Amino acid sequence: MIRLFKVKEKQRELAENTNGKSSFTKQSAGEIRLHKDMRELNLPKSCSISFPNGKDDLMNFQVTIRPDEGYYRGGLFRFSFKVSPIYPHEAPKVKCNSKVYHPNIDLEGNVCLNILREDWKPVLNINTIVYGLYHLFTEPNHEDPLNSEAAAVLRDNPRMFELNVKKAMAGGHVGDNYYSRCM
Amino acid sequence: MTDSTAQVSKSRDLDKLLLRPGHLVGPTFDPGTELRDDIQEYVKILVVGAGGLGCELLKDLALSGFKNLEVIDMDRIEVSNLNRQFLFRLQDVGKPKAEVAAMRVMERVAGVNIVPHFCRIEDKELDFYNDFNIIVLGLDSIEARSYINAVACGFLEYDSDDNPREETVKPMVDGGTEGFKGHARVIVPGRTPCFECTIWLFPPQVKFPLCTLAETPRTAAHCIEYAHLIKWDEVHSGKTFDPDEPEHMHWVYSEAVKRAELFGIPGVTYSLTQGVVKNIIPAIASTNAIISAACALETLKIVSGCSKTLSNYLTYNGVEGLHTKVTEFVKDNDCLICGPGVLIELETSVTLRKFIGLLEEHPKLLLSRASITHRGKNLYMQAPPVLEEMTRSNLDLPLFELMDKIPKDIVHVTGTTSKSDKKTSSLMKLRVIFKGVDGVADMDTAGGS
């Protein structure tokens, strides 16, 4: 390609390119793919999405889940999503922003959902994750605990667990921890 | 007299490649001293990364007769680099890698000029990258490769027959190593697969289930990840963990040790902690040397045509014995980063609404209910409703205005295509050209965009 390089060098000396603006503007492949996910988004009625940084930042968004069945019925839970530029090679980072009494979500908002970590595949999408999160509220699981106290109560005394969830959602203490109202 | 003999001996091996004709040469190979001199004068190469591979690359390229090199790296030298990043000395610790590497190679190889850039790759303007004939990558992350790839492919233009315009092709040579394994590949955008065409080549990172970390750790790595992912946030609310901050790393290490003791798990060490948290596999100097040599040779081949270039992906494995293999991966013609996209010519008066309608009728597209993005700006989103509402007001504006009056540019569209009654959602790249807009006449706005 040396000949071409020489020609280009001479051209450059003659004139700085007039119209050769590149079409790349820091839009990553991940962002482009996320665009498709957003268009395909088909959320259950109990879930909604919002974009705190406006219409041009799809990489950071929030999902609100309001379960309509199960222990958490009537509660309102916010999750923040942070999508990497190499999405979908890497799963989005998801945190629960509402403090919740839940066996699979710890008090820092870490979520134990297999498709967010060990079982993530690039064919999955934002919709899958939201359904996965929703499922955590309808079917909390004591076998994969992040909050082991809550998990033990769910396993040994489901009735007590139900009361604890209600107490936490209404705003109050369960054990040593205070939960703010989220109904 | 002494000068000329020194000259001959210095490029003796290179001369064997560049001055003599051969059978396995590229189609445009024109051997002779002019070629050798032109390479020195005209070729400008950027080396991305001045770490393990970068040090080797700078040395190899300088010794291969390239005189105009630049290097970009955002890191400073650490003690743990010294075993393999051979351009650095103990007294250099804390100094920018790019600067020291450039200086050391210039001291040792007469006549070479290396300009260092101590900054992030994202900090440079696109024009910076366009100035180089070839970009050689010695990186350790997918993100950085993906970024440079998108920049280089962004320069690529296609003619009306969807053939790449040669003068816009920015070749890349990418090296990568991990322990005893490595790869070298040649990326000629528009001709060979780009980084995104084959991103599936990278295995997914090993990630442990959070609940395992929290409840049932079984290995030293589990204990470290617990300290890193769960305990850190619990103790340092709001403060982000920085893996390059030794204090943070020591904290994670000591927490991991406590956790390991609690569960009777052996094997937590400081270096393992670094390895797990930063995803590091111990670097092997000889792997870097081998991969770098392959990359430098490919660079010389691309420039001179003295041999056919690697097609297009070489893997090296020195774990047991030695195994190398070259695989010819195929380009994804629909690649959103390097592919041509579908050419669409428009009047400047066409509104976004009309444009979306045109996509539905376009025989190559038949794309209904399209969402449109341009340079990271979402011009119109069909869904979710919240975004539709935010972008609806754009529908009756001319697309030309929405695209900042750029006469030709790429837009990405997502929509539904139906082929033989089957509806699928697809994401496409379009090359939009506005008729009757002269790039020069439009300087005012183009310059400001």
Image (cartoon, rainbow, N blue to C red):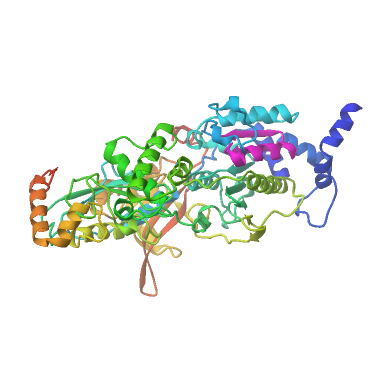
Judging depth in this view, the residue of A16 and A167 nearest the camera is: A167
In reply to whether residue B47 is colored magenta, the answer given is yes
Q: Position of residue B48 (x, y in %)?
A: 58, 39
Quarter of the image holding residue B118? top right
| Residue at 26% from the left image edge and 42% from the top image edge | A52
Residue farthest bottom in this picture? B420
Residue B370 makes an appearance in the image: no
Q: Which residues are magenta?
A: B43-72
Judging depth in this view, the residue of B318 and B416 nearest the camera is: B318
Relative placement, left or right, of B160 versus B29 is left
| Residue at 33% from the left image edge and 50% from the top image edge | B263
Examine the rendered structure and indicate whether residue A81 appears above or below residue A115. Answer: above
Q: Position of residue A82 (x, y in %)?
A: 33, 46
| Residue at 40% from the left image edge and 64% from the top image edge | B366
Quarter of the image holding residue B93? top right
Quarter of the image holding residue B382? bottom left
Judging depth in this view, the residue of B3 and A42 nearest the camera is: B3
| Residue at 89% from the left image edge and 32% from the top image edge | B5
